[in-house]
Amino acid sequence: MKKEDLISLGISDEQAEKILTLHTNSVKDFIPKARFDEVNTAKNELKTQIDGLNKQITELGKLAPENESLKAKVTEITEAQEKIASDYKQKIQDVRSEAIIAASKAKNSKAVRAVIDWEKVTWDDDGNPKGLSEQIEEFKKGDNAFLFEQETKPAAPAAPVAPVFRGAALVTSHGTQPQLPATTYESIKAAQEAAGKK
């Protein structure tokens, strides 16, 4: 949605600005559909792998609890499962942190990631970060504010320059005398006669 599109529908400039502000605020926490699909596909693939590994572990455990080579295979599969689960958790954390950074109107998310103190960020069981939004808000107010798009308010229109008479001279509010055409008795008389003929 662009301001020009709203204006072309007959909405005033001020109303279009307000609509865009409301729209931006309502979708700031949304993740783009393409990114959601990408993460959802990766999640489903990892879940399928984990389920397959769990099934193999269970079957192998039942077949030969005494066999050392099978125990080694079970251990290997268990370690692979743990790595996949860890990778999945990391991807979820990356997606969630990226969504928060994008919603903060960062100009360059990679630069913002570089200044974040990740040791101060904790993650709940669902992969949601705690402390990330607070750091970003501090950055917006501090020395790293340049990393984020700044909300700008339109400048107020300049006040018109009103002429001021000082004595016999006409002076603008800027202190300069405007260049006026020379007025003579003949030019005034000609203008009065022309006005009288109409």
Image: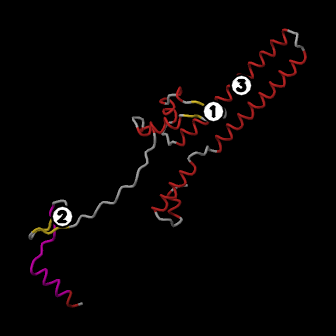
Nearest the eye: 167 or 188: 167
Q: Residues within 10 Å of mark 1 (few under 14, many from 20)?
A: few
**Mark identifier at residue 71:** none
Vertical relation: 79 (above or below) 129:
above
Q: Position of residue 11 (x, y in %)?
A: 50, 65
SS type, badge 2: strand
Location of residue 77 by image quarter: top right
Amino acid type, mark 3: Ile
Q: Are marks 3 and 2 in contact (CB under 8 Å)?
A: no
The residue singled out by tag 1 in the image is 124
- Alpha carbon separation for disc pair 3 and 1: 19 Å
- Mark 3 or mark 1, earlier in chain: 3
Q: Position of residue 67 (x, y in %)?
A: 87, 9
**Mark identifier at residue 172:** 2
Q: Residue furthest bottom?
A: 197
Q: How is the image coloured?
A: secondary structure
SS type, badge 3: helix
Question: What residue is shown at x 20% (from left), y 90% (from top)?
Answer: 196
Question: Magenta span covers which residues?
Answer: 176-194
Q: Residue furthest top?
A: 68
SS type, badge 1: loop
Amino acid type, mark 2: Thr
Q: Is residue 163 left or right of residue 40?
A: left
Amino acid type, mark 1: Asp
Q: Is residue 89 left or right of residue 190?
A: right
Q: Nearer the viewer, mark 3 or mark 1?
A: 1
Question: What residue is shown at x 74% (from left), y 30% (from top)?
Answer: 46
Assign the C terminus to one quadrant of the image: bottom left
**Mark identifier at residue 84:** 3
- Count of all numbered marks drawn on residues in the image: 3
- Alpha carbon separation for disc pair 1 and 2: 66 Å
